[in-house]
């Protein structure tokens, strides 16, 4: 999968492996967390839209209408 959804999944994999140093600036960490939360939200919506699309079904067979 090499489209936007594939990239989002790769990014989510990388986000899952993130860590932080407790010596880092707390305000910067909070801002980074907010950005990550927003990105994960958008990525989840993108994945949902991609994978929840209704699969095409076989065309409906209709009997001829008698008049």
Image (tube, helix red, strand yellow):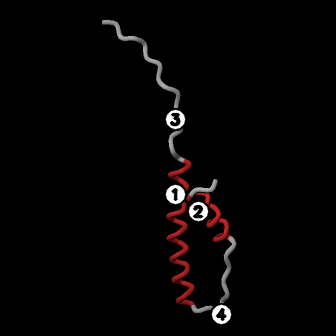
Determine whether, in the image, residue 29 is placed left or right of residue 67: right
Res. 63 mark? none
First in residue order: circle 4 vs circle 1: 4
User: Secondary structure beneath disc 2?
Assistant: helix
Q: Disc 2 designates what residue?
A: 8
Determine whether, in the image, residue 1 is placed left or right of residue 63: right
Tag 4: Cα neighbours inside 10 Å, few (<14), some, or many (≥20)? few
Question: Could you tell me how far apart the alpha carbons at marks 3 and 1 are, in whole angstroms?
Answer: 19 Å
Q: Disc 1 designates what residue?
A: 46
Residue at 47% x, 19% y is 61
Nearer mark to the viewer, of 2 and 4: 2
Residue at 50% x, 58% y is 45
> x%, y% of residue 8?
59, 62
Question: Could you tell me how far apart the alpha carbons at marks 1 and 2 are, in whole angstroms?
Answer: 8 Å
Q: Quadrant of residue 11?
A: bottom right
Q: Disc 4 designates what residue?
A: 23
Residue at 62% x, 91% y is 24
First in residue order: circle 2 vs circle 3: 2
Instruction: Name the residue furthest front.
Output: 2
Are the residues flagged by discs 4 and 3 in contact, CB closer than 8 Å? no
User: Secondary structure beneath disc 3?
Assistant: loop
Instruction: Name the residue furthest top.
Output: 67
First in residue order: circle 2 vs circle 4: 2
Tag 3: Cα neighbours inside 10 Å, few (<14), some, or many (≥20)? few
Are the residues flagged by discs 2 and 4 in contact, CB closer than 8 Å? no
First in residue order: circle 4 vs circle 3: 4
Q: Disc 3 designates what residue?
A: 56
> x%, y% of residue 59?
49, 25
> x%, y% of residue 42?
50, 64
């Amino acid at each position: 999968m090499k489209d936007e959804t594939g990239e989002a999944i790769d990014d989510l994999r990388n986000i899952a492996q993130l860590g932080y140093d407790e010596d880092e600036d707390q305000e910067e960490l909070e801002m980074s967390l907010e950005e990550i939360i927003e990105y994960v939200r958008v990525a989840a919506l993108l994945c949902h839209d991609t994978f929840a699309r209704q699969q095409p079904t076989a065309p409906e067979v209709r009997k001829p209408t008698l008049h």
